[in-house]
């Protein structure tokens, strides 16, 4: 019973991360946002991939764990919930259907300041595997069964999201027309902060979408 799993897994979470922000939080979330982009040097990217192989974890597991560690470091809270979108096409009948089937799962990471990083990575790997194994129930159903209080100032259950896109970007040629991706600034955001990591060629390209009612762009 996947609902039972999530009720146990998310039992006792506060639903709100006390992360340091630059401005006073509005009583009603307005979803105004912007984004900051940067890329990771290809040598660092290669070392990250090698480290993931050595630890027998996927790149997603490594990068999500690093993101959770950063949230832990800056918030000082040892119980971190990160929202992760998934394709939700785990049934064969959905593979060739055009449409939006995405779902969201919550990765709950618990930290012990005395634990070694390797031990945390191992524990977070198991948490992620269990979360994906129980990903058939919708996020809305999880929230409904956990009876989380909805507030107009926060997104429910989690405010910090992580997305990893690990697929090939290719220029598309149509006769004499060449098409390539163009990344645009997003004027609206759903979350306080959403880290989007794309693996393109030999680099990690990172886009940090942030709520401009809460954060100012730093340099």
Image (cartoon, rainbow, N blue to C red):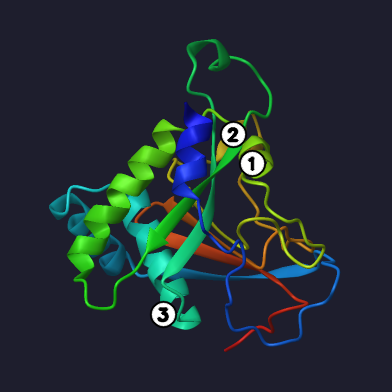
Q: Residue furthest top?
A: 93
Q: In the depicted view, which residue is nearer to us: 167 or 18? A: 18
Please state which of the two labelled residues, at mark 3 or mark 2, is closer to the viewer: 3
* SS class, disc 3: helix
Give the class, few, some or many, for how many residues have Cα within 10 Å of label 3's Cα (few <14, many ≥20): few
Between the residue at mark 1 and the residue at mark 3, the CA separation in whole angstroms equals 41 Å
Q: Position of residue 54 (x, y in %)?
A: 13, 54
Can residue 169 be seen in this snapshot? no
Q: Earlier in the sequence, mark 3 or mark 2?
A: 3
* SS class, disc 2: strand
Name the residue carrying label 1.
179
Please state which of the two labelled residues, at mark 1 or mark 3, is closer to the viewer: 3
Q: Earlier in the sequence, mark 1 or mark 3?
A: 3
Q: In the depicted view, which residue is nearer to us: 1 or 205? A: 1
Between the residue at mark 1 and the residue at mark 2, the CA separation in whole angstroms equals 6 Å
Give above or below for 157 relative to 43: above
Name the residue carrying label 2.
173
For the point 73% across and 64% down, which residue is it? 154
For the point 69% across and 56% down, which residue is it? 156
Q: Position of residue 115 (x, y in %)?
A: 21, 72
Q: Position of residue 149 (x, y in %)?
A: 73, 56
């Amino acid at each position: 019973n996947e609902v039972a799993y999530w009720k146990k897994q998310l039992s006792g979470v506060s639903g709100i991360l006390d992360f340091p922000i630059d401005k006073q939080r509005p009583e009603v979330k307005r979803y105004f946002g912007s984004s900051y982009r940067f890329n990771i040097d290809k040598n660092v990217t290669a070392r990250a991939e090698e480290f993931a192989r050595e630890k027998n974890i996927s790149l997603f597991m490594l990068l999500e764990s690093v993101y959770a560690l950063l949230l832990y470091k800056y918030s000082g809270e040892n119980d971190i919930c990160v929202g992760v979108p998934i394709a939700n096409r785990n049934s064969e009948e959905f593979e060739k259907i055009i449409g939006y089937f995405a779902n969201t799962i919550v990765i709950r990471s618990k930290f012990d300041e005395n634990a070694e990083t390797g031990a945390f990575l191992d524990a977070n790997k198991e948490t992620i595997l269990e979360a994906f194994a129980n990903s058939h129930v919708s996020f809305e159903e999880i929230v409904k069964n956990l009876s989380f209080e909805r507030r107009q100032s926060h997104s429910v259950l989690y405010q910090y999201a992580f997305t990893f896109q690990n697929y090939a970007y290719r220029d598309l040629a149509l006769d004499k027309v060449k098409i390539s991706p163009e990344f645009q600034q997003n004027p609206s955001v759903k979350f306080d902060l959403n880290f989007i990591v794309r693996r393109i060629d030999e680099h990690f390209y990172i886009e940090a979408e942030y709520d401009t009612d809460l954060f100012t762009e730093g340099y």
